[in-house]
Image: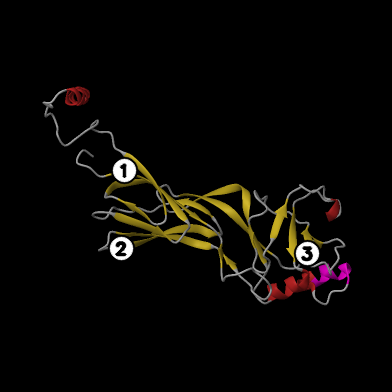
Amino acid sequence: METFNTLLSLRELKDHYSENPVGICPLYKGSIGVSKRFEISGNPVVLPEYISLEKLNIEFLPKQAGTGDPSPENVRPISGWGSVKVTVSNGSASHDYDVPLPETIYGGTVDAVTGVGSKEWYNAVFTGEENWLTWGYNLTDGVTGLYLFLNNEYPKNTYPEISYCPILPYSRLAFNNVTGQRVAGSTTPYFVMSFPTEFFTGVTSTEEVVPYWISYLKTQYEAGTPVTFCYKLATPEPFKFSKISIPSLIGENTFFTNGESMDIIYKESSFWG
């Protein structure tokens, strides 16, 4: 093999400097036995006929129903994933492959080839039993609105501005980036929920805000439509699942996922393996 590859290199040099190329192997350029690996990203993506997949990483985000800004009048529920789907087609045949998840996961990544995933989002469900606090914002101030703090322990987040809530267009989770004086001196993590003032129509004092909010949460929870808050974790949690095999179809293979995007590493099919 080493001798043959050396001859190939000599042939390439002579081809370059001679008008009479040496015909060792007119169909091949390169070293025998070295598989060529390619990487592609997107959704969908097109692969030529391939030997094998070395990586099929799928990213998925929390699912939020409906459109427009969330509000009590436009509730946009958040749901998670029990599996992620990949569809492979060559124009004449199409196959669906379900990538199973070990539990409901709201967002993260999975590698269908290795069977290893990463849980990257957390969904908190509010029952009205939490320790909610606030302070004396003017309820008539339609610019700043009103804030509520949740002084309970939750997994730490990584980017407070990215979150999903069924009834609020803006909410975040803060971790000790405020001294804690606004939350009874606590230095533990806490939610910061920002409300439009019209949410508290009929409330005449800040002392009524927390009871009003707790009553709302309990009513929604008992009705089976709890208020939730989905946010990105600071430290993703790894998990394992049953990996899948996706054989190549004849010709071009088009991959599509119901997740967000894919990162794929594959080996191309060729005469030389």
- Name the residue nearer the viewer: 96 or 192: 192
Q: Name the residue under label 2.
A: 94
Instruction: Label 1, secondary structure: give it.
Output: strand
**What quarter of the picture does the C terminus occupy?**
top left
Earlier in the chain: of badge 3 and badge 1, it is 3
How many numbered tags mark residues here? 3
Please state which amino acid type lies under the numbered disc 1.
Lys
Q: Mark 1 points at which residue?
A: 267
Q: In this view, does 94 lie above or below 50?
A: below
Residue 215 lies, in percent from the top left, at 78, 73
Q: Is the magenta stretch mostly helix, strand or loop?
A: helix
Q: In this view, does 218 lie above or below 101?
A: below
Asked whether residue 56 is in view, the answer is no
Earlier in the chain: of badge 2 and badge 1, it is 2
Earlier in the chain: of badge 2 and badge 3, it is 2
For residue 257, which numbered disc appears in the image?
none
Please state which amino acid type lies under the numbered disc 3.
Val
Instruction: Label 3, secondary structure: give it.
Output: loop
- Residue beneath the point at 19% across and 35% down: 28
Task: Report, in whole angstroms, how far the alpha carbon at label 2 lies from the one at label 1.
Answer: 21 Å
Q: Name the residue under label 3.
A: 143
Residue 210 forms part of the magenta stretch: yes
Task: Report, in whole angstroms, how far the alpha carbon at label 3 lies from the one at label 1.
Answer: 57 Å
Tell me, yes or no, whether the two marked residues, 2 and 1, touch with CB atoms within 8 Å: no
Q: How crowded is mark 1: few (under 14 residues within 10 Å), some or many (20 or more)?
A: some
Residue 12 lies, in percent from the top left, at 20, 26
Magenta range: 205-212
Please state which amino acid type lies under the numbered disc 2.
Ser
